[in-house]
Image (cartoon, grey):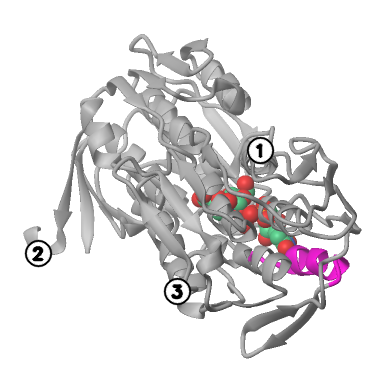
Amino acid sequence: MDRLLIKGGTVLEGELRASGAKNSALKMFAAALLADEPVTVCNVPHLRDITTMIELLASLGVDVVIDEKMSIEIHANTIQRFTAPYELVKTMRASFNVLGPLLAHYGRAEVSLPGGCAIGPRPVDQHLRGLEALGAKIEMTDGYVKATVKGRLQGARVLFGCRTVGGTEHIMMAATLAEGTTLLENCAREPEVVDLANFLNKMGADVQGAGTETITIHGVESLKGCSHRVIADRVESGTYLIAAAATRGRVKIREANPAHLRVVIEKLREAGAKITLTDDAIELDMEGRRPCAVSLVTAPYPAFPTDLQAQIMAMNCVAEGTGIIKETIFENRFMHVHEMNRMGANIQLEANNTIAVVEGVESIFGAPVMANDLRASVSLVIAGLVAQGDTVVDRIYHIDRGYEQVEEKLQNLGADIRRVAMEQM
Ligand code: EPU
């Protein structure tokens, strides 16, 4: 098992290119199951989760062709099986989203229930309610959801009981091949939902209103092939911006989308960063200053994303002043707090572990640390970068699920970080 070894204390400085968005690409792979012709998804990041999704498609008998630039061509009509097994769904929840497309296109699907995960129970009730509203017959047996429909799904009105990104995307995909019109209300407005809608429309779907609370889908009989470039990964870009701010550094991120990071940029400005924006680049410069602690509440887009909460907490650990961070999306997303405190941070959890009060300290110290979630793990890398001495981050397979070439990108910014296999330590 690999670990990351970080010698803290360097100031990050330089440029990097934003990778394609994992959370867009994964859903597009599921959506490809709706088409009768091959679809190509370009700018796909080279990540463990992407490989898992490709394995899942391959296990269904779907042809997947990958070129050297990570353009991925998927030909759904070579499909032979309609079951997504537990082994794959448990390693990556996004694979649950093949249920709706399989059902809409082929009338049947059997997909393992994903179960809980490190950051919370993460139910899929909204996904299942939505599919049932479209006419699916859903049965649960042996931990699997078995969904069938006679003929086509039927357009319906679906009011989501909570703002769910995966739920919105799932029902939006399924409704593209339904008979009649579907009205989705209380939808998630994340940029990945919009990217997926644009992809579906290129395939010949008729999806209107993505990015607002109400999405209307006029069902079509079939979907065709297309080619689509995935948007930049806003969480990856945000992570490097925060890392640079925490180290009092300077970074330019190319091929990023500043419009998707408005609240994050606002918070970093509040922390003292000078930020310059163009249409596709974000430049942050701390001009050598120590960041000021910021307070925030995570909430659905366009508010501050839960996926950047742990990273900004790492910055707050060494900032001037006190920052209060409230997590409202996931029940158990403060795993990094105990590890950061072991490094000398001063963080108190309050209100039934939903609020973290971070009192900035002059310096934290390197330690062996680990976390069971992607964003918590990367926040410990940031903590390692600002710590005095050596930090070893264990279980970095979590980071490899969502950060393409993390150590190369950080090395290019001047970080002293390297990957070591267990036996080399
Ligand atoms: N929820 C329900 N019922 C449902 C669905 C969701 O109660 O049927 C709840 C969840 O338990 C959670 C809240 O609604 O408390 C929001 O969950 P959501 O469905 O929006 O999350 P998701 O679709 O499972 C995606 C991203 C996450 C990101 C969240 C929130 C993907 C593959 N994952 O998850 O990304 O944190 O939206 O923005 O798109 C990550 O990349 O590290 C990551 C966890």
Residue extending farthest left: 424
The residue under the point 28% across, 33% down is: 409
Q: Residue 214 at x, y = what percent?
A: 85, 42
Residue 139 appearing in the image:
yes
Tag on residue 423?
2
How far apart in space, not on screen, are marks 3 and 2 (Cα)? 33 Å
Check disc 1: other Cα within 10 Å, few if <14, some if 14-19, many if 20+.
some
Looking at the image, residue 7 lies above or below residue 152: above
Residue to which mark 3 is pinned: 59
Q: Residue 99 at x, y = what percent?
A: 65, 69
Residue to which mark 1 is pinned: 198
The residue under the point 53% across, 38% down is: 228
Check disc 2: other Cα within 10 Å, few if <14, some if 14-19, many if 20+.
few
Residue mark closest to the camera, 3 vs 2: 3
Region of the chain picked out in magenta, as a range: 122-135
Q: Residue 9 at x, y = what percent?
A: 23, 29
Asked which quadrant contains residue 385, the reply is top left
How far apart in space, not on screen, are marks 1 and 2 (Cα)? 46 Å
Magenta residue check for 355 = no
Is 160 on the left or on the right of 36, as rendered? Answer: right
What amino acid type should be assigned to the residue bearing mark 2? Glu
